[in-house]
Amino acid sequence: MTDPDHPETGELPAQEAAALPVPRSALAGNPVSSAMPPTAGIGEQAPRRVRRRSTAEAARPRFAALGIAIGFGVLFAWDLVEAVANLLALLAFADAAGHPLNSYAWLVLGAAILVPPAAYTTALVLGYPRGPRKLAAALLAGLAATACLGLTLEALLRA
């Protein structure tokens, strides 16, 4: 680091340099400190070694995440089909009884239809960038929440 007040040496005086914060990698006993070049200034980072993955290694997590998303998608679709079937069955029952469905029934059945796609999309958006394991965990949590809400809505409808 150069100082415009000391152009002859190009360095800060020792007292001013001692007052500057020391980067963690420059501390003794840290293996990263040996990787820093001796000319590295304060605030500069040591060069990192980057391990390049082959295209097969890079594609493997994507295929795993895609398989997980499709597998859970089938389960979420099952919940959606179940909600639509409940709506159609109750519409047929109400028609046979000669009474229309009330607004409460429409609200409960509509929520049961909207929850599975919303939960699947939310879990997919939150979990996909984080890798296959976290995607599976997010989708499993979304599926559990969908199942709980579906059962709760069905219990409310029957009450």
Image (cartoon, helix red, strand yellow):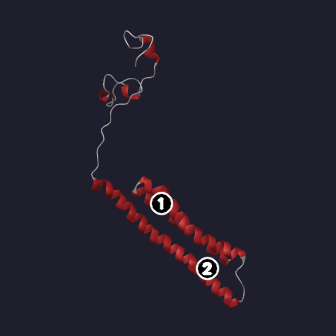
Residue located 34% across and 31% down the image? 46
Q: Is residue 79 above or below residue 51?
A: below
Q: Position of residue 86 (x, y in %)?
A: 59, 80
* Nearer to the camera, 27 or 95: 95
Q: Is residue 107 above or below residue 136?
A: below
Q: Is residue 48 above or below residue 117?
A: above
Q: Quadrant location of residue 17?
A: top left
Q: Earlier in the sequence, mark 2 or mark 1?
A: 2
**Mark 2 is on which residue type?**
Leu
Residue located 72% across and 86% down the image? 99
Q: Quadrant location of residue 128?
A: bottom left
Q: Position of residue 153 (x, y in %)?
A: 63, 72
Image-based side of 93 in relation to 68, left or right: right
- In which quadrant is the C terminus drawn? bottom right
* Nearer to the camera, 9 or 26: 9
Instruction: Look at mark 2 in the image and give the residue it sits on.
Output: 87
- Secondary element at image label 2: helix
Q: Residues within 10 Å of mark 1 (few under 14, many from 20)?
A: many
Q: CA distance from mark 2 to mark 1?
A: 26 Å
Q: Position of residue 31 (x, y in %)?
A: 31, 31
* Nearer to the camera, 58 or 112: 58
Q: Position of residue 27 (x, y in %)?
A: 37, 25
**Mark 1 is on which residue type?**
Leu
Instruction: Look at mark 1 in the image and give the residue it sits on.
Output: 124
- Secondary element at image label 1: helix
